[in-house]
Image: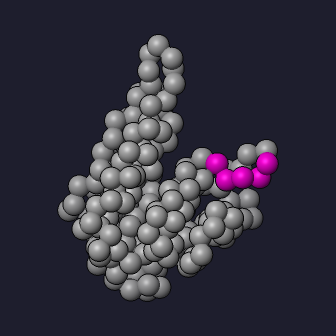
Amino acid sequence: MRKWPFLLISRSKSTQGWRSVLLCRESFSRFLRSAAIVARMSHIVVLGARILRDGDGLLTGALGRRVHAAARAHHARGWPVVAAGGVDWNGEQESTAMAHLLGALGVSSIVCEPWSRDTEENALRCRALIGAVPIVLVTCHWHMKRAQGHFERAEFSVSPLPVFGPFLPRGQRWLRTAKEEALSWLAR
């Protein structure tokens, strides 16, 4: 299994400002400049998440961060974007919400996968939709290990593009990590 790029996200004690934005931007630039990745990729697959909107109706939270990362990768390389996710959140489907924002961000080639309910189904239904092609997988950093495993079992060649979120207190990070590790173990 290929290792995915790892970045340390931390807060500065003196300013309480986030340094993760700069680290993510540097990682993203290195990712897109990698000749090995550029030569063999075919699609960008962005995984769905809970739909959260701000006061202006714009996507926020994990889903907003994932969609923006996929749009940046599309603009840099022109690969089509697959919006994968069929869960309804308050009457709105993940793939539809992602497609609307991707279109607003100027993404010209969008494929929707609106049937899957979990990560394993994302992989299987994407396989049926686009075939076993090399992909860039966009999801949160804490979800990447499990998602990459599901997509590799579905015979995709995966290049991960993890998206980083805000800093969480130690207890919440521990619970999220424990949940992901347990789900990864059960999926084997």
* Residue toward you, 145 or 83: 83
Toward the left, the furthest residue is 1
Main SS, magenta residues? loop
Report whether residue 154 is seen. Answer: no
Toward the right, the furthest residue is 56
Report whether residue 35 is seen. Answer: yes
* Residue toward you, 174 or 35: 35
Q: Taking 95 as reference, is 166 above or below it?
A: above
Q: Which quarter of the image is occupied by the N terminus?
A: bottom left
Q: Taking 57 as reference, is 73 above or below it?
A: below
Q: Residue at x 39, y 39 (%)?
A: 23
Q: Residue at x 45, y 50 (%)?
A: 163
Q: Is residue 58 magenta?
A: yes
What segment carries the magenta color?
A: 56-60
Say whether residue 11 is left or right of residue 91: left
Q: Position of residue 13 (x, y in %)?
A: 44, 16
Q: Position of residue 116 (x, y in %)?
A: 53, 73
* Residue toward you, 91 or 161: 161
Q: Is residue 25 magenta?
A: no
Q: In terms of image quadrants, where is residue 164? A: top left
Q: Position of residue 37 (x, y in %)?
A: 29, 67
Q: Which quarter of the image is occupied by the C terminus?
A: bottom left
Q: In terms of image quadrants, where is residue 126? A: bottom left
| Color theme of the render | one colour
Q: In terms of image quadrants, where is residue 133? A: bottom left
